[in-house]
Image: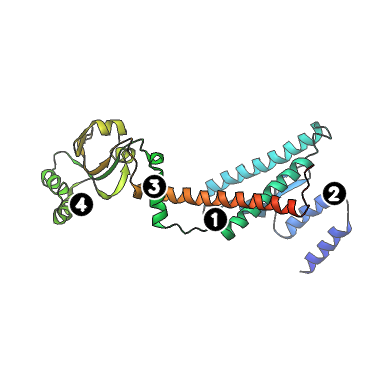
Amino acid sequence: MKKALIFAAIVLSLSSCKFIGRLTDSASELFGDEVVARVGRHRLHRSELAAYIPAGVSPDDSAGLARQYINAWAQDLLFQEMADRQLSKSQKDVSRELEEYRRSLLRFRYEQLYINERLDTLISAEEVSEYYRNNQEKFALDRPLFKSRYIIIPAGSRAWRTIRAKMTSDDDADLVEADSLAFTTAIKYVDASDNWMDAILLAREFGTDYESLLAARRGKEIEMPDEQGNLRYAYIVEMVPAGAPAPIEYCENRIRDIILSGRKHALMQSLEQDLLQDALDNDKLVIY
């Protein structure tokens, strides 16, 4: 503690930048915060570097991140030094840009505060339904949606015929049995009959593109053998074709985001108009 106080007093009493640079290095040694890189009179200390590297990373990753940070730190300073030498006085004057950025940043922060204090985030099911009814054209599908059960199973599996019969049934007991049989014999079995799935996601599960997937569809079934001797099969419980509006439950989150965005926009318009009107009414704003 005594060393620290003496050192601080010395630093405050001296004005030479060069000497202060040397004292900074001495401080690093005194407090165990060594200098790891230097650009001119600028020093990068180990504590600054350590704050950039997440805890728990491997030594190799840590070294790589350290090099990345040091390079970026050095480049910033070297660019600044080059700009100071090469740019004219007027080119180095960034006061106007800084003031514009400051105003923009303060406006943004106030807008966020204003919206957060006033935005009603509660959206009823009736509001979602009303928006959906009035804007169904916005939810036209580019690709089909499926509710399905699908399986990937060795083509020669003895249980396949039984599983197929069970997984295409509407009886809950059959579906439970299909799931049980598939657990021990299939590579993968998924019952997604309660959730809408984009055709491209089902195609990805089958390791193919969605055009090939749709070309293989025969009524409610899609059957595609692969080169490894496995069978990829999907039973389509329900389907919405491309061009039709997506079901409301599929786009409900998107609708809620749209409604919230509209409320934010309305709040901002109201704020802008109120500010101008108040300024005009109080002669704070005068337009000649």
Residue 17, disc: 2
Counting from the top left corner in percent of width and height, residue 97 is at 74, 41
Q: Quadrant of the C terminus?
A: top right
Against 199, is 284 above or below?
below
Left or right: residue 27 compared with residue 242: right
Instruction: State the residue in front, 201 or 65.
Output: 201
Label 4 packing within 10 angstroms: few (<14), some (14-19), many (20+): few
Say which element carries label 2: helix
Give the amino acid type for the residue marked by disc 1 in the picture: Ala
Left or right: residue 6 compared with residue 101: right
Q: From where the camera sits, is residue 270 visible? A: yes
**Residue at the (52%, 58%) spot, across then down:** 120
Q: CA distance from mark 1 to mark 3?
A: 47 Å
Counting from the top left corner in percent of width and height, residue 170 is at 16, 51
Give the amino acid type for the residue marked by disc 2 in the picture: Cys
Say which element carries label 1: loop
Q: From where the camera sits, is residue 108 visible? A: no
Q: Quadrant of the N terminus?
A: bottom right
Q: Nearer the viewer, mark 2 or mark 4?
A: 4
Residue identified by numbered label 3: 132
Q: CA distance from mark 1 to mark 2?
A: 35 Å
Counting from the top left corner in percent of width and height, residue 179 is at 19, 52
